[in-house]
Amino acid sequence: GQIKLLEPERAFAFSVQAVDERTIEARFSIASGYYLYREKLKFAVEPATLAGAPVLPPGKVKDDAFFGNVETYRGRLVVRLLLDGAQPGAKVTVTAQSQGCADAGVCYPPQVQSLTVVLPARGGRPGEPVSATPKKAWFD
């Protein structure tokens, strides 16, 4: 029978949270049976700039049918994005580029997801997490 695959927004659910006026956490919740490639993960913010390259945690090394020896992520991934020169209370759009595969042997095309958060005031409480809402399912 056909393998039922999740659409990429569900297989690799992306969310962001403004932790303080200079820090945004980007999170991926990766469905069981799926993985993301560490080297395919890139983040951008606007209108703010990143204060440095995001520190990606080490992945699990996998001998991958598609890309050879690569580091992959499964489960939950949290990446802190440090902002440079962002104004407290400003809106910041975080764009994540990612690519992942299913253990079933199917690779997804690269994904680009953008989410906008409002930075808290200095010393303010963290903002609410904002998640990407999947579009209407294409596999019913």
Image: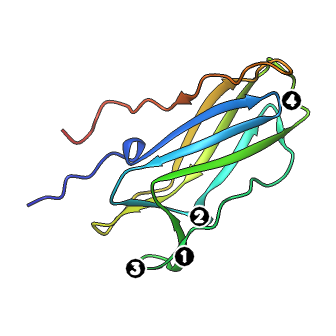
Asked whether the residues under the numbered discs 2 and 1 touch, taking CB atoms below 8 Å apart as contact, a structural biologist would say yes
Badge 4 crowding class, 10 Å Cα cut-off, few under 14, some 14 to 19, many 20 or more, is: many
Residue identified by numbered label 1: 70
Residue identified by numbered label 4: 86
Q: Quadrant of residue 93?
A: top right
How far from the left and from the top, in percent, is residue 71? 56, 72
Residue 20 lies, with reference to residue 73, above or below; the image says above
How far from the left and from the top, in percent, is residue 55? 74, 57
Figure disc tally: 4
Asked whether the residues under the numbered discs 4 and 1 touch, taking CB atoms below 8 Å apart as contact, a structural biologist would say no
How far from the left and from the top, in percent, is residue 86? 86, 29
Whichever of labels 3 and 1 marks the residue nearer the N terminus, that label is: 3
Q: Which residue type does callout 3 highlight?
A: Ala
Q: Which residue type does callout 2 highlight?
A: Arg
Whichever of labels 4 and 2 marks the residue nearer the N terminus, that label is: 2
Residue 40 lies, with reference to residue 80, above or below; the image says below
Whichever of labels 4 and 3 marks the residue nearer the N terminus, that label is: 3
Q: Quadrant of residue 34?
A: bottom left
Asked whether the residues under the numbered discs 2 and 3 touch, taking CB atoms below 8 Å apart as contact, a structural biologist would say no
Residue identified by numbered label 2: 38
Q: Nearer the viewer, mark 4 or mark 3?
A: 4
Residue identified by numbered label 3: 65
Badge 3 crowding class, 10 Å Cα cut-off, few under 14, some 14 to 19, many 20 or more, is: few
The secondary element bearing badge 3 is classed as loop
Q: Locate the C terminus by quadrant.
A: top left
